[in-house]
Image: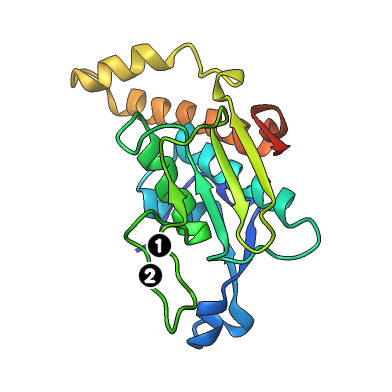
Amino acid sequence: MIEEYPEFFSRVPKIVMIDPLAEFLGTFKDGKIKYNYLLVVKAAGHSCPTVAGAYGMTYKALKALYPDSPPIRGDIKVEFKEKLEDGVAGVIANVITNITGATEKSGFKGIGGKFIRHSLMGFGADISSSARFTRVDTGKSVDVFYDHSKVPGNPRQPQLMQKIMQGAASKDEKETFGKLWQERVEKILCEKLDEVITVKEV
């Protein structure tokens, strides 16, 4: 089976992590793991402004927390102001979990007190940002703000979506809707990332 997906997926900045657990278990040489947008989309099952924002927030937060070295997977705490059940908090959290390893309760319990991944993610935090990322080793934190409204969708999208939901859209209309949808995601990740995502040190 040949996978077909938008070309811009390959142009989204990649994230390189060092995972001590992966190195310990011989999974990746030196624990080095490279994440890209395609992997995140496969895990999420789709590409949208929410998934794109979660990836972009993680990318920019990790660059700010680790300016001179690769981020350490499993050594990053993530907090959200929303509750897990609110809006798209769960979707965003799943993307961030895939990259950072941080989980609320379901994560790895560790080996001999090391490589623990659970209790590194929290919801309902007293913060004003979209998310707060913290290095466990140094305590350095950054707040990340994401505003995808700065990249509005094509005005044709609502009408096309309505026709698709009603089962009245043609094949061409369905394809056009998908193309327009992904064009917005492309703008967010490949053109406007510094405009839609702001990082501030706490």
Q: Would you name the residue on which mark 1 appears?
A: 118
Figure check: 184 above or below 3:
above
Callout 2 crowding tier (Cα within 10 Å): few <14, some 14–19, many ≥20 = some
Callout 1 crowding tier (Cα within 10 Å): few <14, some 14–19, many ≥20 = some
Is 8 in front, or is 201? 201
Residue visible at 34% across and 39% down?
Answer: 84
Q: Secondary structure at mark 2?
A: loop
Q: Would you name the residue on which mark 2 appears?
A: 108
Q: Position of residue 149 (x, y in %)?
A: 55, 19
Q: Is residue 42 left or right of residue 126?
A: left
Is 110 in front, or is 51? 110
Residue visible at 57% across and 64% down?
Answer: 75
Residue visible at 56% across and 25% down?
Answer: 148
- Residue type, mark 1 in image: His
Q: Position of residue 122 (x, y in %)?
A: 43, 46
Figure check: 72 above or below 45:
below
Q: Is residue 81 left or right of residue 129?
A: left
